[in-house]
Amino acid sequence: MAARAIAGRDPRVRRPRGSLQVDPDQTLVFGTEARPRTPAFFVWWLRIEGTHSPTRRFERRVPLQRTNRIALNLPRGRYQVAARWELTDAFGFTRLIPRARWTEILTVEPVWVPFSPPRPPATRPGPWRPRRTGRRAGDPFDVRSYVPGDDLRRLHWPLFAHAGDLYVRTAEPSPPPSGHQFLVLDTEAASEEELDERLGRLLNWLSALDAQGTGWTLAIPASDITLTAGTAPGPILAALTPAVLPDGPVVPGWPETVTVLTGQGSRGAAALSRRLAEARRRFQPIISPSTPHPASQKIPWWGRP
């Protein structure tokens, strides 16, 4: 008690001065102008506490120095970080915590997760031109792979019978059709780790769309958030927590085809599919985390049933 009384009368304890900063590499930096007086057999500690959700917290305690640098390795999230001083004796029987408290926000963005997204749907068919007249180089030399949105009348069925893959005839060089990808994120998840996996795949997908020059719109109904191409989704995705898709009508302005990034057995995605069916809109679920399936063995055309 005497040691606590001596420490309590120290003006550096009653009116402490310090600063707490967060570096981009998840490093907390706490600095103070002067350390308080330490009674015999006592130690001053710096206590760091962070809260993201009831199931995701962290706590660190290090000896108090003029400058403390604490490297963290935390999963995705937006953490409320608080730093406080703590005086304890060598045996842990006595503890003094001054009222001074420093707070800061720590944002850890999702980490990319390997993901092979499907081709973006096309809003219009690819350019079509009549076949050129005159001598041709042959059917195998004027085709390209089929992309959703191509005119089905241009499919090369004889080549499909031999190769097993869809190709379209292109008498003139023409690029594949491109469109705008509309995504809906289902945040219903059994755990924070499952949602982290889903967000990592989504971040990889959005980066791929940006690299291709494909526009995208991301809707998060559970949080009433809508993002578009050209924005940084990382900080927004970091603050999400597991939540069920809300009930109600489909948001006005949604296109006829939407892709929902969801999880296995998600009730929210099932409810959204029913709402989309009532609005006569198509629903394309993308399950994540997804289990890779072994590639099917190629069967020659003469051996197919």
Image: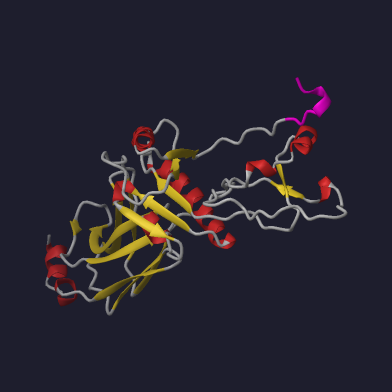
Residue at the (34%, 43%) spot, across then down: 242
Residue 83: % across, % down: 27, 63
Tell me the quarter of the picture where residue 156 sits: top right
Residue 4, percent from left and from top? 15, 63
Q: Which residue is situated farthest in the front direction here?
A: 133
Main secondary-structure element of the magenta-colored stretch: loop
Q: Quadrant of the rendered structure where residue 211 is?
A: bottom right
Q: How is the image coloured?
A: secondary structure
Magenta span contains residue 264: no
Viewer-closest of 290 and 219: 219
Q: Is residue 177 left or right of residue 82?
A: right
Confirm whether residue 48 shows in the render: no
Q: Magenta part of the protein: which range?
A: 297-305
6 vs 282, nearest the viewer: 282
Q: Residue at x 74, y 36 (%)?
A: 157
From the viewer's side, name the closer residue of 116 and 226: 226
| Left or right of 120, for residue 93 | left
Was residue 299 drawn as part of the magenta stretch in this picture?
A: yes
- Residue visible at 41% across and 53% down in the picture: 218
Q: Position of residue 62 (x, y in %)?
A: 35, 61
> Is residue 235 among what the camera can see?
yes
